[in-house]
Amino acid sequence: MPSQATALSSGFDASVTPLVEMHDIDKAFPGVRALSHARFELRAGEVHALMGENGAGKSTLMKILSGVYTRDAGDVRLNGQSVEITSPRQAQDMGIGIIHQELALMRDLTAAQNIFIGREPRKAFLLDEAALNRNTQAIFDSMNLKLEPTVRVETLTIAKQQMVEIAKALSYQSRVLIMDEPTAALNDAEIAELFTIINRLKAEGVGIVYISHKMDEIKRISDRVTIMRDGEYVGTVPAMDTPMETIISMMVGRTLSNDALVIPNTSANPVALEVRGLNRGREIRDVSFSVRKGEILGLAGLMGAGRTEVARAIFGADPRESGEIWVNGNRVGISAPQDAVRAGIGYLSEDRKQFGLATGLDVRNNIALASLERFTGPGGVLNDRGMQDVAQKYITQLAIKTPSDTQEARLLSGGNQQKVVIAKWLLRDCDILIFDEPTRGIDVGAKAEIYKLLNALAEQGRAIIVISSELPEILRLSHRIAVMCEGRLTGVLPGGSSQEEIMRLATLRPSAVAETHSERRSA
Amino acid sequence: MLTRRTLLGAISALALLTAGGAASAQENYDIALISKGFQHQFWQAVKAGADKAAAELGVTVTFEGPESETQVDRQMDMLAAALSRNPDAIGFAALDSQAATPLLQQAKDAGIPVIAFDSGVDSDIPLTTATTDNVAAAALAADKMAELIGGEGKVAVVAHDQTSRTGIDRVDGFVNRIKENYPNIEVVSVQYGGGDQLQSTEITKSILLANPDLKGIFGANEGSAIGVANGKTELGSNIVVIGFDSGAAQKGMITSGVMNGAITQNPVGIGYETVAAAVKALKGEKLEPVIDTGFYYYDAATMADPEIAAVLYD
Amino acid sequence: MTETAIPAAKSGPRISGAFHRLLAFSGLIALVVVFSLASPNFMQTQNVLAILQATSVNGVLAIAATLVIITGGIDLSVGTLMTFCAVITGVVLTNLGLPLPLGILASILAGTFCGLVSGTIIAKLKVPPFIATLGMMLILKGLSLVISGTKPIYFNDTPGFNQIALGSAVGSVFPAVPVPNGVLVLFLVAGLAAFVLSKTALGRYTFALGSNEEAVRLSGVNVDRWKIAVYAVAGSICGVAGLLIASRLNSAQPALGQGYELDAIAAVVIGGTSLSGGRGTVVGTLIGALIISVLANGLRILSVAQEWQTVVTGCIIILAVYADILRRRTL
């Protein structure tokens, strides 16, 4: 047990009964000890950040508080009273709301129907759709959110879906609000809106648990920070007065070296990938760029700028209207992902669980998935032994943390899942790798490892494109930075350019003004 | 939309082609046959007989039946559609006579003559019935069984179903003849396999395993009989097997000796007589109330006899 | 008929949803037009009524299947459950000699009870719906044979019974259009099901379950209870189908029923309901069921050989689903 318990009440009057107290919480899953003597405290009117690497137990602890899991041991108190929380319903009734990291919305239902699921206003035994939409509108208004209650969630962007989740939590009149990475998919304007709402709730005396990996956000919004590591409590510190490095070292249990960006001279290297005049509707407009071998090209822009669309079009995942793709000086016809893979292009999607990883398969099979023909012997029998050797090689080479190559991929942490996907493309001899948000949902320690890996891949002569919404990440990695805005490439900057320069290109065209001013545009 | 429309165009073209194919004779009567089944070889043989009569007599015949002999309501839909077509005569083998009564009444009211075939119809509306006497046919199977097992021991029956007329008649015909004429023979088990070969095989094996001293099994239709013979082969048993109907598989088994013999109806004759009777009715000729289309016992020795070979089908 | 998709949604997919129903509907109209042109016998009142009559049982079963499929489940037992309910009615009316209303009640209660059992096995024991209802399909098939003594039970002692499907309340008022009562029952069931789907909490949870069951659970909804309720309602609708078929045949045929679930599911799919759950409409299913019976009837009227009828039906099912995929792609 760490010994920083004294910091628990720092900055607060210890005589006031906390809203939530959790002590000595244990939780085990088959084969995994998720929590051991974990503890947490939340006061009314406080934003309390919960930090730790993936697998540190933050989400598990909060799922216990919100009734999704039941604890094996320990004590949970609400306003000083010991309570048993056995279901999400019960947690809601006690005023504990949670916004899940993975959006828990029903895509085929409307926003209003989602928000009031399980508590639909009724007239006699019939649903009162009018009241439902009225109530929802009221919540949206209070959030200053421009959204129709009757819009189907399926048609919304991830950011808007997140807003619906928040509206849903607000609708419970929660006194405790748990936000698990609420800004993962939000742009700056939306984050500002969210923080306005958080501050308002705080003023009303709501206690907010804020789980995030983004250090700047933690500094901006939270009052205290509790740090967890390996399912255990490490300590609680005031957010303002604690240096970022201290928090990170508490999280990873060591100090991280802050590698500076080194830009290799790649100008003499041959061009690996060239894109000429790529077009698709309003999403991609006349995009041309190239990446050399050994180079890391950052693709920056605001959400909706068309970065992922460009990547998917190159990869053949979406059709393109026009444009040529040249690999190693040869024009290649790509109309489906298998064409791209044959040309040596690998794409690592931002949504690993949905597109990148066969979560039900083990590590070995995930790595071999794109290269099965290589392991197919006579009669179509798979050479398991060969697959195992190769998997072991990559597990060592990429330092994938897994008990064995037969571990199911879904049981790995986000960073290690990402490495498995990288191994898959490396095995397939993909020398052009497109990383879409490679560190989304990955904790600080693992992030540094992924960065190191990307640099190593570039040094080996692979061409790399990194798409990221986090400017520090772009700046930390890119040898050159291509910036997009509203489907167009607005400029290519040298590595180490300033954030301001990137933001200028990313907002080159005033987005609020519609087509009438399109002539003014120039890149 | 476009594709659907194109397809429909193709369908109607196909339809016209099919309908036009046989329509060359001077009378050109349109006769709709609604049978109890379709895919089964037996029904295909009935259809062949009907087609033969159609060609000889210069009439148009359509032949339809539900996929399985349990689908009573589907047969009603077929009968209703046939009536809507306004044919000159209808041939009908009822799965359930009572269910068909309202539609048959409708046919009578519209002046469309109805000829029953195979298991017939429990009603006075059909002018005649072209059928096999199933009770007598199964009794003949019982006689042959008794003869082959030497007049004593245990036997069993694997039949197709418990609800159809043929199922009931064949089981009753066999069981009653044994009871009445062969006091030393005991029918230890009557089981139903839906006419499905595989299911009947499993049933046969379980009967054989439960009664090691069993002397013979009667398979009451084509599917059941093949199933019984397969079960016998799988267990390496040497019981007497008597089948029903023909078909390439059953004929092969009789030739090879796995099956001792079988009763055959005359399905081709049933189809032929039904159409012939319909034409007679349309021409105003008088009809007997029942047209017996006959049945025979055949085995490896008699299979090639011209009289037998003519009524066997593949 | 009322709108049964997610009500009041103003966004794109709903317009395309309406478009798809329009597509299925125009498909139906196109079939009718083609058959009418090809044969003068097709559009006769008597034949139209025959088509509707032929749709009634499959239509009611398909509505039951629709509810379950929208939850993301599947019900393979609808056909034999229908038979089971018919047999129960036979026992109550013929074997026990009880009055007609009790027979009707017994059929619907038997259906509801079996649906409850299926739902409980699926929700509480976590047996996948495909397996649970496959088991129920066989159990009910066997029980129908056991209870009936393997013989059809006739309703000759209950004179009014065949009026449920064959009588015509409409015809007694307008003798020119003797729409059989069975068809009225179909539309009544469709109307009620559409109402339940769009206006009640049960309907809302039906869509929600198919859309994201985990999300519903995390919202504090008693998922198991609602899932069981959906299967129970579907079961009660099968009970109605049991009454219809028994009344039409004036007998409970214990061996019938297996295979009917596939026709029901085909109607559901042609009607644009997604097999992966979350979306679907009763109107669509009704159109799907009509397409199947119009096709069967029309091809028969045109004397198309039976082998080809089957081929064409298969093609139409694939085309209809492909149209749905095209619609989603252009979303």
Image (spheres, rainbow, N blue to C red):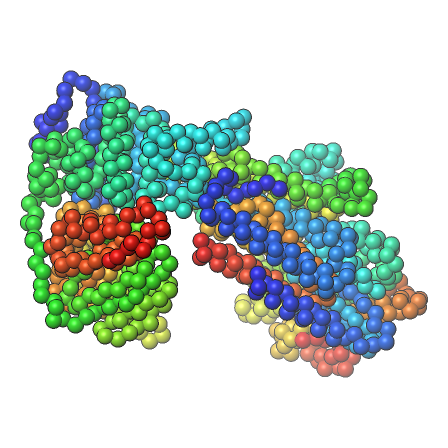
A177 shown above or below B94: above
Q: Quadrant of residue A380?
A: bottom left
Q: Position of residue A131 (x, y in %)?
A: 47, 29
Q: Position of residue C139 (x, y in %)?
A: 56, 47
Residue B276 seen in the current view: yes
Q: Position of residue B68 (x, y in %)?
A: 66, 59
Q: Would residue B282 be found to the left or right of residue C309 on screen?
A: right
Image point (84%, 65%), residue name: B88
Residue A421 seen in the current view: no
Image point (58%, 49%), residue name: C285
- Check the picture and name the quadrant holding the C terminus of chain B: bottom right
C188 shown above or below A276: above
**Residue, far top:** A15
* Residue C160 vs residue A502, the one in the foreground: A502
Image point (52%, 58%), residue name: C323
- Check the picture and name the quadrant holding the N terminus of chain B: bottom right
Q: Position of residue A482 (x, y in %)?
A: 21, 58
B313 shown above or below C276: below
Q: Would residue B55 be found to the left or right of residue A194 on screen?
A: right
* Residue B213 vs residue A9, the one in the foreground: A9
